[in-house]
């Protein structure tokens, strides 16, 4: 491996897809690093001591470039002779900084659009005359200075892509990093390899030694507990930490009453096989009592986050542990609005859901800059079994965010049955290995039905089945109707309280994967 990997820096302007850009770059075995949008020239020069900086990408963001207080960058960056690509807000910021005209669009674009390519060269090399792209913007670049030229436009966006006539400076209004942009990877590869001349000299496996060293440096010889859910993230963090902490690490599984059918027993069996300290805590009554009468999803998440910490604090006190280790990954952080310029989509219990006062010296999150598929690659290299590596993602707050409205024992019982049916039918069909997630949601809507020739009034269950690579974007799965019919028939037959089953056909964006 090269001592200084070829690197693309990503300036973070608060867009929730900032790290998705970084992920796409890493997919090509080129290292990427997210840096603050206002990084100084001095800090960039300092980075050059360990990174071979080949290019800069300016991310999207929720702000308007012409609004007071909106994030800006040091204009001297344009004089570094390093190729620059602006995406969405970054595209607008380049135009605005160079005295172009950026104003609110007459028609905002959110979702699939079509761009007409005027110049299929450099950044847009290999693209067709008409390209399917994904837009998400309220402002638009309407004109450029004379030393720039338009490379693409759309019906509502006269400057959808541009380039400087002499310098390697480019901008695209659409998002090439999301899977909904048909040839987005081509655009990014054109920038990474064609314009920046990067070499593919990095891979995720290089991180294992780095993460182990960082854990050791942080916790030294202290005892540590890890919040173990049995999912891929916490399991990978557990095995990673065990390599340096050994018996100083205790894995704590909390049964909060919000888990799936037979889940506690499955996790016990799996982790009893590992050479780690394992503790299972039954805290069902405690969690459900705190959640009684709570309807707001953000409040649910905060209560659950607080109660998890309190359970871990109790265990830590008994075994004299000073640090808490978590399997937090990047989608958790970005959706919780971790960046000072980013919007909060929803609070994740292990990020913004944590109470402000905790009885630990610190919280360690070794996987916080990785996406789910990168964690899976790491897990395989660490030797985790396939049943863990390919386990379905499950939200930290569990079934609490799959029950819309108040949580009750009855609703939990109904949802567990429905979820089990979805899992059984999908896995029986052989589709499970190609899907990201498949689960049921118990809505707060009751509807009229007919059962046994009599009127029935009961719950509506929604089914969510999606395909994704990293959970930042997702498409609903086009499941054959006969499989959906089997799921629907079983749920309404086997769960008398349910009279209607609906299928969620919304992509992410605009929705999220979980309903709450």
Image (spheres, grey):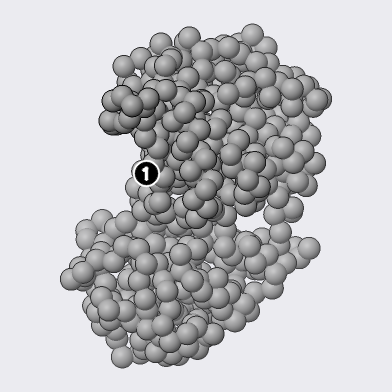
Q: Is residue 333 left or right of residue 278?
A: left
Q: Is residue 363 above or below residue 38?
A: above
Q: Residue at coordinates 34% horizontally, 22% vertically from top-left? A: 406
Q: Residue at coordinates 39% horizontally, 89% vertically from top-left? A: 118
Q: Nearer the viewer, residue 17 or 413?
A: 413
Q: Residue furthest left?
A: 106
Q: Nearer the viewer, residue 84 or 289?
A: 289
Q: Is residue 387 left or right of residue 96?
A: right
Q: Residues within 10 Å of mark 1 (few under 14, many from 20)?
A: few
Q: Nearer the viewer, residue 78 or 425?
A: 425
Q: Is residue 17 above or below residue 419?
A: below
Q: Residue at coordinates 63% horizontally, 41% vertically from top-left? A: 427
Q: Residue at coordinates 74% horizontally, 53% vertically from top-left? A: 206
Residue 166 locus on image (x, y percent): 45, 90
- Which residue position holds label 1? 345
Where is residue 219, by image quadrant? top right
Q: Is residue 122 above or below residue 304?
A: below
Residue 202 locus on image (x, y percent): 71, 62
Q: Is residue 283 visible?
A: yes
Residue 221 locus on image (x, y percent): 73, 25
Q: Secondary structure at mark 1?
A: loop
């Amino acid at each position: 491996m090269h001592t200084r990997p070829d690197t693309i820096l990503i300036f973070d302007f608060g867009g929730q897809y900032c790290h998705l850009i970084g992920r796409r770059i890493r997919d090509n075995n080129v290292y990427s690093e997210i840096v603050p949008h206002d990084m100084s020239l001095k800090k960039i020069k300092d980075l050059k001591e360990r990174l071979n900086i080949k290019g800069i990408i300016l991310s999207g963001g929720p702000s308007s470039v012409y609004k007071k207080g909106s994030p800006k960058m040091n204009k001297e960056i344009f004089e570094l002779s390093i190729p620059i690509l602006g995406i969405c807000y970054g595209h607008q910021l380049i135009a605005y900084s160079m005295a172009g005209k950026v104003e609110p669009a007459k028609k905002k674009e959110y979702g699939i659009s079509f761009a007409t390519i005027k110049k299929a060269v450099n950044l847009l090399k290999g693209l067709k005359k008409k390209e399917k792209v994904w837009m998400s913007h309220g402002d638009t670049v309407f004109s450029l200075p004379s030393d720039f030229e338009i490379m693409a436009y759309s019906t509502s966006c006269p400057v959808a892509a541009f380039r400087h006539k002499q310098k390697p400076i480019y901008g695209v209004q659409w998002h090439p990093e999301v899977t909904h942009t048909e040839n987005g990877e081509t655009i990014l590869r054109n920038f990474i390899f064609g314009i920046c001349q990067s070499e593919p000299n990095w891979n995720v496996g290089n991180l294992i030694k780095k993460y182990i060293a960082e854990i050791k440096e942080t916790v030294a010889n202290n005892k540590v507990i890890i919040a173990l859910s049995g999912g891929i993230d916490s399991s990978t963090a557990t095995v990673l930490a065990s390599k340096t902490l050994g018996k100083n690490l205790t894995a704590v599984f909390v049964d909060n009453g919000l888990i799936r059918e037979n889940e506690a027993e499955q996790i016990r069996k799996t982790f009893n096989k590992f050479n780690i300290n394992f503790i299972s805590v039954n805290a069902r009554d405690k969690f459900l009592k705190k959640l009684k009468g709570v309807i707001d999803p953000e409040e649910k998440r905060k209560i659950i986050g607080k109660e998890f910490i309190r359970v871990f604090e109790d265990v830590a006190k008994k075994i004299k542990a000073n640090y808490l280790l978590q399997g937090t990954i990047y989608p958790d952080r970005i959706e919780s609005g971790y960046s000072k310029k980013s919007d909060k989509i929803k609070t994740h219990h292990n990020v913004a859901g944590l109470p402000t006062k905790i009885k630990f010296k610190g919280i360690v999150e070794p996987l916080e800059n990785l996406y789910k598929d990168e964690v899976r690659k790491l897990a395989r290299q660490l030797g985790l079994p396939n049943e863990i590596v390919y386990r379905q993602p499950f939200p930290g707050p569990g079934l609490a965010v799959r029950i819309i409205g108040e949580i009750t024992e009855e609703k939990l019982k109904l949802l567990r049955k429905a979820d089990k049916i979805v899992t059984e039918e999908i896995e029986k069909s052989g589709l499970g290995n190609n899907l990201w997630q498949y689960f049921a949601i118990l809505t707060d809507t009751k509807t009229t039905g007919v059962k046994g020739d009599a009127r029935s009034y009961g719950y509506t269950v929604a089914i969510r089945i999606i395909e994704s690579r990293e959970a930042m974007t997702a498409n609903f799965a086009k499941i054959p109707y006969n499989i959906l019919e089997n799921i629907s028939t079983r749920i309404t037959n086997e769960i008398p309280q349910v009279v209607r089953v609906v299928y969620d056909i919304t992509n992410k964006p605009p929705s999220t994967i979980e309903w709450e």
